[in-house]
Image (cartoon, rainbow, N blue to C red):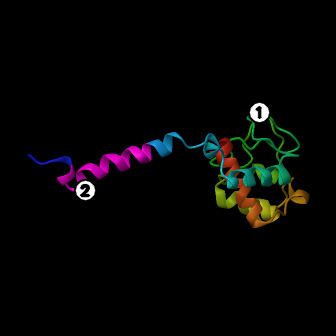
Amino acid sequence: MRSRLQMSPGTWLRPIATAGALTLLLSAPPSLAQQPASDEAAQQAFNNSCRTCHSVKDGDNRLGPNLSKIVGRKAGSLPNYNYSPSMKDAGFVWDPDKLTRFMVKPDEVVSGNKMQPYGGVSAEDAAKVVAYLQAAGGQ
C-alpha cells in the first residue's frame, strides 16, 4: 500500500490549491464588489455635462428629454417631450457612436436641434457619458 507521502504532487496539491482559492474569494472585503472607478468617472461625466437638463429616470423630462433607454430609441420619438422639428425628422436610432458624436458636435448630427448651445463636451467625456447611460438603463 502506498503512503500519502508517496503520492504524486498533483493528487494532493489540487485540492489544497482549490481550498486556498475558495478561502481567498470568500474572505475578500466587500469593497471589492463596489463599482470600478471608471463607472464613477462615467457618472461624474454625466453629472458635469448632462444632469442639469437630462435625467436617466423614465418619464422625468426636464429642459431636455429623459435619457432612459436612449440607446436603441428612435431620435425625437419620446412621448411627452417637445422636440425640435429637426430632431423629430432625424430618422435614425441612437447608438453609442451617434450619441457620442451628438454630444461632441450636436449640430453636425442633427442641424437645428435644441441642444445646440449646450453641446460641445470632449469626445472622452462623451464616451464616458454613453457608458454611464448604458449602465444606468440606457440600453
Q: Residue at x 75, y 66 (%)?
A: 123
- Is 93 left or right of 53, judged from the image as shown? left
Q: Residue 126 — which label?
A: none
Label 2 sits on what residue type?
Pro
Does the magenta portion include 129? Answer: no
Residue 35 in percent (x, y) is at 66, 47
Check disc 2 and report the residue beneath it. Answer: 9
Residue, x 71% and y 49% (percent of image)?
75
Q: Position of residue 6 (x, y in %)?
A: 17, 53
Q: Residue tagged by mark 1?
A: 59
Considering depth in this image, is 88 or 105 the residue closer to the camera? 105
Query: Looking at the picture, which amino acid does disc 1 mark?
Result: Gly
Classed neighbour count for the residue bearing mark 2: other residues with Cα under 10 Å, few (<14), some (14–19), many (≥20):
few
**Residue 104 appears in which quarter of the rendering?**
bottom right
Which portion, as a residue range, is magenta?
5-22
Quadrant of image for the C terminus: top right
Q: Secondary structure at mark 2?
A: helix
Residue 87 picture location, percent across and down:
78, 52
Q: Residue furthest left?
A: 1
Q: Give neighbour class at mark 1: few <14, some 14-19, many 20+ (Cα, 10 Å).
A: some
Q: Quadrant of the N terminus?
A: top left
In the figure, is residue 17 to the left or right of 125?
left
Q: Nearer the viewer, residue 19 or 51?
A: 19
- Residue 31 visible in the displayed image: yes
Q: Is residue 76 left or right of residue 82?
A: left
